């Protein structure tokens, strides 16, 4: 048997390899969600407020979402309210 040129054994280093430098942290990025107008000015204003979340870090989204949800809930509740009688409709 002849010894062929063998590669020397690779020794594991005692120190762990350093992780690659993290890339610079990216700022908030808009998701590009299209908000289709509903035709109801109040609802459209609340939905437009969602665009504010595009420029916030994730921990700031909750406040915007809760505000929009509150406004939309109030708009829906107003639809169920009985109409207020006009000044000359006070018939009894």
Image (cartoon, helix red, strand yellow):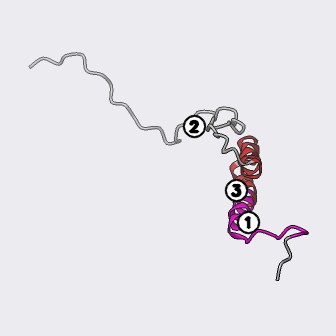
Query: Does 81 appear in magenta?
Result: yes
Query: Residue 71 appears at what percent x and percent y?
Result: 75, 60
Which secondary structure dominates the residues rendered in magenta? helix
Observer-nearest of 44 and 8: 44
Work out which quarter of the rendered image holds the N terminus and state it. top left
The magenta stretch is: 68-88
Q: Which of marks 3 and 2 is nearer the N terminus?
A: 2
The residue carrying mark 1 is: 78
Q: Where is residue 63 in the image (x, y as percent from the top left)?
A: 75, 58
In whole angstroms, how far apart are the C-alphas of marks 2 and 1?
A: 60 Å
Tell me the crowding category of disc 1: few under 14, some 14 to 19, or many 20 or more residues within 10 angstroms, Cα based. Answer: few
Q: Residue at x 30, y 22 (%)?
A: 7
| First in sequence: mark 1 vs mark 3 | 3
- The residue under label 2 is 18
- Is 48 situated above or below 61? above
CB within 8 Å, label 3 to label 2:
no
Residue 39, compared with residue 76, is above or below; it is above
- Taking depth in this image into account, of 25 and 47 the one nearest to the observer is 47
Front: mark 3 or 2? 3
Residue 14 among magenta residues: no
Dot in front, 1 or 3: 1
Q: Residue 42, how many percent across, how many down?
A: 77, 52
> Which picture quadrant has residue 78?
bottom right
**Which mark is first along the chain, 1 or 2?**
2
- Work out which quarter of the rendered image holds the C terminus and state it: bottom right
Q: Residues within 10 Å of mark 2 (few under 14, many from 20)?
A: few
Return the residue nearer the eye: 23 or 33. Answer: 33
Disc 3 target residue: 65
Point out the residue furthest to the left here: 1
The residue positioned 52% from the left and 41% from the top of the image is 16
Res 4 quadrant in image: top left
């Amino acid at each position: 048997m002849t010894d062929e040129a063998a590669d020397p054994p690779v020794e594991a280093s005692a120190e762990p390899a350093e992780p690659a430098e993290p890339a610079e942290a990216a700022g908030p990025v808009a998701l590009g969600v299209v908000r289709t107008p509903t035709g109801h000015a109040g609802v459209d204003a609340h939905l437009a407020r969602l665009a504010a979340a595009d420029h916030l870090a994730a921990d700031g989204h909750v406040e915007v979402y809760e505000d929009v949800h509150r406004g939309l809930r109030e708009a829906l509740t107003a639809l169920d309210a009985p109409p207020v009688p006009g000044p000359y409709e006070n018939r009894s």
